[in-house]
C-alpha cells in the first residue's frame, strides 16, 4: 500500500506542465509548493522498493536518503510538542500527522525557493547593496 505513495509524484509534474500553459509567471512557485507537499510521502514510499533486486535497491536508497532529510523534521517537531511518545512504534494516524506537518514545512520552503528561481528567470530580483540602495539585476545573456 505504501508503494502507492509514489503516485503522488505525478502532482508536481502535472503542476509544472499545467502552469506552463495557464500561469507561466508563477510556474516555479507552484512547482515548489507542489513538490514540497509530496516529497515526504514519496520518499517514504520509495523505501519500500528495497525488496526488489538491483533497480529497487537503488530507488530504496534514494528514498532512504530523501526520507532522512524530509521525514525527520516533522517527526522531531511533533515529538518536541508532545504529540508523539519517545521510542514507541508509529501508528498510521501518527504517520499521517508527520506527513502533514512535513507538507506544511517543506511546501513553504520549496515554494520560497521556487519563487526565487522564477524571479531570477524573469529578471525581477532586487539585491540590496550596502550604501547604494537596491540594485535591480537584469536578465543575463
Image (cartoon, rainbow, N blue to C red):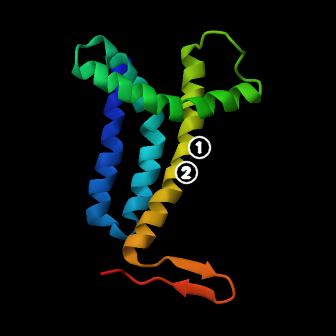
Q: Nearer the viewer, residue 138 or 21?
A: 138
In the shown orientation, is residue 76 left or right of residue 57? right
Residue in view at x 54 percent, y 16 percent: 92
Q: Quadrant of residue 39?
A: top left
Q: Nearer the viewer, residue 132 or 114?
A: 132
Mark linked to residue 137: none
The residue beneath circle 1 is 105
The image quadrant where one finds the C terminus is bottom left
Above/below status of 131 relative to 93: below
Above/below status of 63 relative to 138: above
Residue in view at x 57 percent, y 43 percent: 104
Above/below status of 27 relative to 8: below
> How far apart are the alpha carbons under marks 1 and 2?
6 Å
* Residues under numbered marks 1 and 2 in contact, where contact means CB atoms less than 8 Å apart: yes
Q: Secondary structure at mark 2?
A: helix
Outermost residue toward the front in this view: 130
* 10 Å crowding of disc 1: few (<14), some (14-19), many (20+): some
The residue beneath circle 2 is 109
The image quadrant where one finds the N terminus is top left
Task: Give coordinates of residue 84: x percent, y percent.
Answer: 70, 20
Task: Give coordinates of residue 87: x percent, y percent.
Answer: 68, 11
Amino acid at each position: 500500500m505504501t508503494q502507492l505513495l509514489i503516485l503522488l509524484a505525478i502532482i508536481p509534474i502535472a503542476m509544472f506542465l499545467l502552469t506552463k500553459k495557464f500561469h507561466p509567471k508563477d510556474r516555479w512557485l507552484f512547482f515548489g509548493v507542489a513538490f514540497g507537499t509530496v516529497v515526504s510521502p514519496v520518499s517514504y514510499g520509495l523505501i519500500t522498493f528495497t525488496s526488489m533486486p538491483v533497480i529497487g535497491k537503488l530507488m530504496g536508497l534514494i528514498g532512504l536518503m530523501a526520507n532522512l532529510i524530509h521525514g525527520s523534521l516533522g517527526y522531531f517537531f511533533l515529538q518536541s510538542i508532545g504529540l508523539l511518545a519517545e521510542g514507541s512504534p508509529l501508528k498510521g494516524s501518527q504517520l499521517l500527522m508527520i506527513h502533514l506537518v512535513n507538507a506544511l514545512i517543506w511546501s513553504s520552503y520549496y515554494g520560497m525557493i521556487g519563487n526565487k528561481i522564477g524571479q531570477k528567470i524573469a529578471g525581477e530580483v532586487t539585491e540590496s547593496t550596502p550604501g547604494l540602495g537596491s540594485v535591480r539585476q537584469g536578465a543575463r545573456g
